[in-house]
Amino acid sequence: MLNGTRSALFDHYLGISRLLAGQLDFNAIIQAVAVEIGHIIPHDHLDVCIKMLDGKYHIAYESGLETAWSQQPPALLTGSPIRSLLSGEVDYLLSGNACSDPRFHFEGAFSSPIIALALRSRLHVPLRVQGDIIGALSCSSHQPDHYTVEDVENARSIADLLAPYFFALRAAEQAKRSAVVETEARAREEGLRLGALKLTEALEAERQRIGMDLHDQTLADLTRLARRMERLTHLPDVPGESLEPLFRSLQHSMHDLRQIIEEAKPSVLQLFGVAQAIENHLDRSVRESGSAITFRVIDESQDQLDGIDETVATALFRIVQEAINNAVRHGQPSEILVVLQNCSTGLSVAVTDDGLGLGEPCEQVGHGIDNMRTRARLIGGRFEIGSIGSKSGTCVKLSLPRHTLKTV
């Protein structure tokens, strides 16, 4: 008779193991194994409480009677009627009448379902994985004094079967939640990036429109004014020495305006492409600085710049333009080198000089670096700036993934 009872128990344990296979969520497991557990430990209510990874919250899954425990979101562990078990203070909980047992009814305890459903006899054992308590298995009966110490041992055996599955499911659920949160964060960031990119495109278009208006109207007006002033200096009744300084100031203003127009509307970029625009700007910047700076542009981009998206091309040019301006104006270099290079992931652009270097962070004045970094982020690129090893000088590097070059 004893052997027959043990054989029956063993069959039910095997049945639980078979039913666990293929179950992919907590509720499915509880519903699948509840009947087999009932053959080992008869119950009116069965639930599994799982601790969240943070160790502060828990959530319940149940079978049989439906209670408020499984209908609430993750709750604080401190309010659980079985917090002493979940925290490891006791090895198990066994009560003949939980409705009046003070262990379940303390200030802040969410124990109302015990009384509402008359869950008198209660049996609780921990779910352990590698010595850590990840939750608890609970059986309840309307009948008082329904469970014994033998039932505790049987519940422990069941808990040992269930715990690894719940541990794996908890990890999978957490990974899924983390993936959802990360995906949502990336989607929000991408939405902000695309919104900012459209704004940048609009600003760039407006910048070019202003450049054309300045060229077609303002610069033309100033040119006519300069010619009239030049003619006035040749009249016998007009003192030329008084007009000469004014004429020179006007010419300087026109020169500055032409530079503003050129920067607002990089026509070389539109007509001849990125590499030629960079070389043209580098040549003009060095000549206008009056410094003896040697420079080179090495284009090893192969076909990466063919058909490049206009917005990406403009942003790339602006970044290199700012890097060149910084080197010429502040670095006092003897050489500037720009390298456009095809790489396995896309396109790499580096602006290197042998000047004074970045210096101390407090000495880095202005928003040029921040602007370059922002432009790079808007087109999905990675921006880096730093010194050249132990030598003086600066290297500004922009890396663009292949998929960002053609469309944005």
Image (cartoon, rainbow, N blue to C red):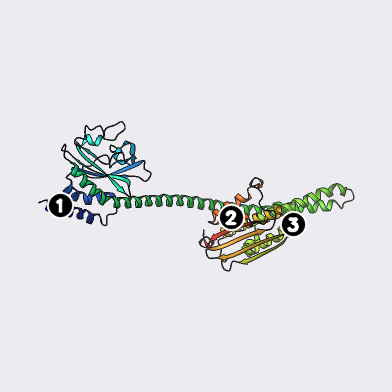
Q: Nearer the viewer, residue 385 or 285?
A: 385
How far from the left and from the top, in percent, is residue 346? 54, 63
How many C-alpha atoms fall within 10 Å of the one at disc 1: few (<14), some, or many (≥20)?
few
Q: What residue is shown with label 1? A: 6
Q: Residue at x 16, y 52 (%)?
A: 9
How many C-alpha atoms fall within 10 Å of the one at disc 3: few (<14), some, or many (≥20)?
few
Q: Which mark is residue 288?
A: 3
> In what element is the residue under mark 1?
helix
**Residue 28 seen by the camera:** no
How far from the left and from the top, in percent, is residue 132? 33, 46
How far from the left and from the top, in percent, is residue 157? 23, 49
Q: Amino acid at mark 3?
A: Glu
Count of marks, rendered view: 3
**Residue 140 seen by the camera:** yes
Question: Where on the picture, by quarter, is residue 98?
Answer: top left
Q: Residue at x 68, y 62 (%)?
A: 280
> In what element is the residue under mark 2?
strand
Q: Which mark is residue 384?
A: 2
Q: Amino acid at mark 2?
A: Glu
Q: Earlier in the sequence, mark 3 or mark 2?
A: 3
Question: Where on the picture, by quarter, is residue 116?
Answer: top left
How many C-alpha atoms fall within 10 Å of the one at disc 2: few (<14), some, or many (≥20)?
some
